């Protein structure tokens, strides 16, 4: 049985959804994009929103709309996909890295105070793996230090912290619709805000420095960060199955938790109780007493595709000369000990059981191997 790490959840429904774009001959950003934005604003509980070509550029737009640029510093967790930091770098600002909690891998606010300087203008909590950062702590910290909040919610569409939607806490929030996200448009992003002035800045930045297309008067410098109605049609189709996607992802996560419950040598990472709407992005296991190399190799040999967790950004070759180094970080431990298990919507129960059985077999075979080695050593020394 082959079990891939991920498969996008698209089928003939998405194929059918794009037909109308060709029937009305509107394939650039248009009516379907407006409808998609309206639906996303409802889901994320924000007043305003704009689309972006992808999640990275959504972050860039959000940062720029907040006026962040050269000379500024933004606190970013070192444990996240590198795009979070790269978007800060794109503005000319500097990402300053902070560690994460070991239990849920979200930003550790208790370690942020020591990072505040006169140049600190914002903090970027990243909601990872369908969990949520502790937004009570984030908002309090930002308020006390008079800095802005930009939520990287690429993996958190529909996720809630204390019954409030991720993406509705910060000055801006950014989402991704890449193929492995909760809903997909292939590539795509969204920036949400409750501030009308920030919204206007987003419009200028993404639409060549003007609020409306068709005008050739450009009050500000802007660029082209639009999406197409073809992508938005796919996104609208995905939203019709959003509830099913959430339910299936939760069922997959719960099945992993149940089947691995007695394996005391590993732990399935779970969200804090304040995450009142958990939509699993990945199912993460953390090995307690060994690194992940051998188990990943064993799973791969059994046709189960594996993936590590994120490598700390402060240790990345491209950032080492221009970042604050974090010693003995929880992020580095997570990279060495954590494994992403397959958890896409189309994953079948039989495949989940196969993955879990293979994990259990690994431990049994390792135990047998050690016993055989011990017996062989004992026989050699006694002779």
Image: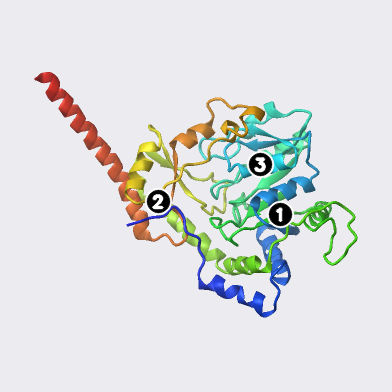
Q: Quadrant of residue 125?
A: top right
Residue, far left: 383
Which residue in the protein does label 2 denote?
256
Residue 325: give x, y in percent of width and height: 61, 26
The residue under the point 56% across, 70% down is 14
What residue would you read off at disc 1? 191
Residue 108, above or below 270: above
Q: Say whether residue 84 is left or right of residue 375.
A: right
Residue at horizontal 32%, vertical 47%? 301
The residue wearing badge 3 is: 86
**Residue 345 falls left or right of residue 377:** right
Q: Secondary structure at mark 2?
A: helix
Closer to us: mark 2 or mark 3? Answer: 3
Determine whether the residue tagged by mark 1 lies in a helix, strand or loop.
Answer: strand
In the rendered image, which quarter contains the N terminus? bottom left
Q: Which quarter of the figure is the C terminus placed in?
A: top left
The mark closer to the camera, 1 or 3, is 3
Q: x and y percent of residue 195 in the render? A: 80, 52
On the rendered structure, is 372 left or right of 20? Answer: left
């Amino acid at each position: 049985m082959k079990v891939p790490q991920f498969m996008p959840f698209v089928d003939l429904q998405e194929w059918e959804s794009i037909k109308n774009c060709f029937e009305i001959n509107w394939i650039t950003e248009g009516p379907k994009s407006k409808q998609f934005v309206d639906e996303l604003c409802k889901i994320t509980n924000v007043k305003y929103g704009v689309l972006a070509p992808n999640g990275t550029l959504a972050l860039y737009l959000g940062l720029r709309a907040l006026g962040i640029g050269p000379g500024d510093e933004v606190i970013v967790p070192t444990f996240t996909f590198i795009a979070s930091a790269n978007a800060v770098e794109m503005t000319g600002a500097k990402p300053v890295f902070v560690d994460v909690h070991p239990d849920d891998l979200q930003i550790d606010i208790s370690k942020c105070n020591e990072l505040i300087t006169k140049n600190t203008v914002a903090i970027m909590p990243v909601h990872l793996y369908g969990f949520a950062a502790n937004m009570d702590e984030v908002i309090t910290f930002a308020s006390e230090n008079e800095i802005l909040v930009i939520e990287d919610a690429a993996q958190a569409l529909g996720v809630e912290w204390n019954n409030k939607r991720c993406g509705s806490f910060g000055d801006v929030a950014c989402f991704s619709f890449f193929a492995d996200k909760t809903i997909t448009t292939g590539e795509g992003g969204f920036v949400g805000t409750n501030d009308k002035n920030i919204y206007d800045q987003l419009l200028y930045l993404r639409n060549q420095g003007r609020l409306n297309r068709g005008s050739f008067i450009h009050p500000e410098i802007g660029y082209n960060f639009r999406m197409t109605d073809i992508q938005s049609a796919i996104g609208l189709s995905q939203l019709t199955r959003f509830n099913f996607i959430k339910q299936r992802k939760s069922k997959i996560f719960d099945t992993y938790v149940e089947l691995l419950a007695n394996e005391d040598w590993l732990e399935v990472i779970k969200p804090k109780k304040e995450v009142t709407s958990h939509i699993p992005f990945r199912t993460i296991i953390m090995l307690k007493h060994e690194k992940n190399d051998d188990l990943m190799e064993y799973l791969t040999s059994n046709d189960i595709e594996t993936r590590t967790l994120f490598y700390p950004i402060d240790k990345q070759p491209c950032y080492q000369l221009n970042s604050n180094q974090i010693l003995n970080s929880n992020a580095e431990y997570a990279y060495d000990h954590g494994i992403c298990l397959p958890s896409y919507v189309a994953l079948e129960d039989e495949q989940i059981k196969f993955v879990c059985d293979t994990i259990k077999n690994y431990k049994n075979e390792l135990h047998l191997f050690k016993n055989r080695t011990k017996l062989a050593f004992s026989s050699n020394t006694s002779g």
